[in-house]
Image (tube, grey):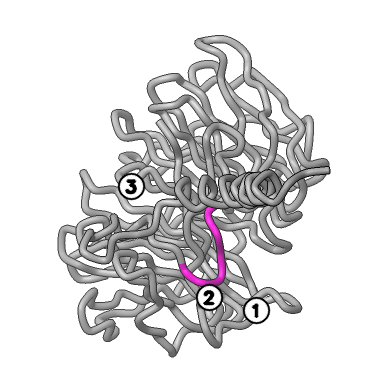
Amino acid sequence: MLDFRSKIVVKFGLVALIAIPALATRASRVEPDPSVDEPVLEKQTPAVKASAPGAAGLHLVQAIPLPGVEGRIDHLAVDVQRRRLFVAALGNNTGEVVDLSKGVRVQGISGFHEPQGISFVPDNNRIFVANGRDGSCDMLDGDSFRPIQSVNFADDADNVRYDPAAKLIYVGYGSGALGILDTTDGRRLGDIKLAGHPESFQLEKSGSRIFVNVPAAGHIAVVDRHKHALISTWAVERARSNFPMALDEPGRRLFVGCRKPPRLLVYDTTTGKPAADLEICGDTDDIFYDPARKLVYVACGEGVLNIVQQKGAGPYERLAGIPTAAGARTALFVPEFDRIYLAVPHRGTQGAEIRVYAIQP
């Protein structure tokens, strides 16, 4: 049997064995220093915890609630200088303004009619919003958010793109056309006719071409924006419902997202011929190309953010998808911040929000 002194030694030994792991755990957890100002883009909201890096080093760092926003959320635009995100809340008939520095929604702009496309012009601080229900495109002041001009197209004004070199806005609308607006006063300058309603389209920076998804016609329209004329069409034969699009101009590749079946088609922009064909998740509505990392980001309403990687100058490979939320099919990649902003609609217990994904080097 143990004497009294031996019992004391054993007792304190057991206490030490229990306490040491707890102390080690406490020591490994670094408490935030309130005197240190964290980078604003990394601050967490109570609704979400930062995830571990997933595919291609992408991980969730923030969720910004959009209180009171109901229905489908369409496209997004950014004011890089003032760190503002503009959201076309189609089902809510509002434009939502998010302060990315503070991580909060600061204002809802009413008076729209199914806002779909949205673009910010930094040169004169103007916002352009295309409305699907009445076919109008509104130009707003970027400070007061008051309307300055409104142009009525036939119907279904949809995607919007800004040409910074020419100071022009292009609006896809109706049964087949791109409308052209002057960014200084919002005047309508002309139209480029197409064979069907245009979905996503992309402008070359070093050339004069615009590549346009025209799903009703089953092709990609190639337009010369200087001549205001259609110069070619590229058949979309391996799938249908070609909605989103992204462009790798230096690499001469065009990325086209299809829904039936869910495929990512890659075209050679020199020849107009298909160069690759990959399976993706369903219900995609936005695609972005990241030239620094040679990655393609595909937002899918099925509830997945697909990532496709190019191997050198060779083939493309789909990496593991990142689970998101049902209906989250629109997004915006902002290379200046190395962030992807994903629009999540209100469905069931999931509230409307903007999820922020950081991209690791």
What's the distance in space between the residues labelled 1 and 3, CA to CA?
28 Å
> Residue flagged by tag 2: what amino acid is it?
Ala
Q: Nearer the viewer, residue 138 or 153?
A: 138
**Residue 266 x, y percent position in the rendering:** 62, 26
Q: Closest to the observer: 145 or 213?
A: 145
Q: Magenta region: which residues?
A: 45-50
- Disc nearest the viewer among 3 and 2: 3
Secondary structure of the residue carrying numbered label 2: strand
C-alpha gap between disc 1 and disc 2: 8 Å
Label placed on residue 337: 3
Q: Earlier in the sequence, mark 1 or mark 2?
A: 1
Query: Residue drawn 66% across and 38% down?
Result: 219
| Magenta span main SS | loop
Q: Would residue 172 be visible to someone looking at this image?
A: no
Residue 247 sits above or below residue 338 on the image? above
Does the magenta run of residues contain 137?
no
Q: Secondary structure at mark 3?
A: loop
In terms of secondary structure, where does tag 1 sit?
loop
Residue at mark 1: 71
Q: Against 17, is 235 above or below?
A: above
Q: Which residue is mark 2?
A: 89
The quadrant of the rendering that contains the N terminus is: top right
The part of the image, by quadrant, that contains residue 264 is top right
In-image side of 77 versus 51 (left or right): left
Give the residue type at disc 1. Gly
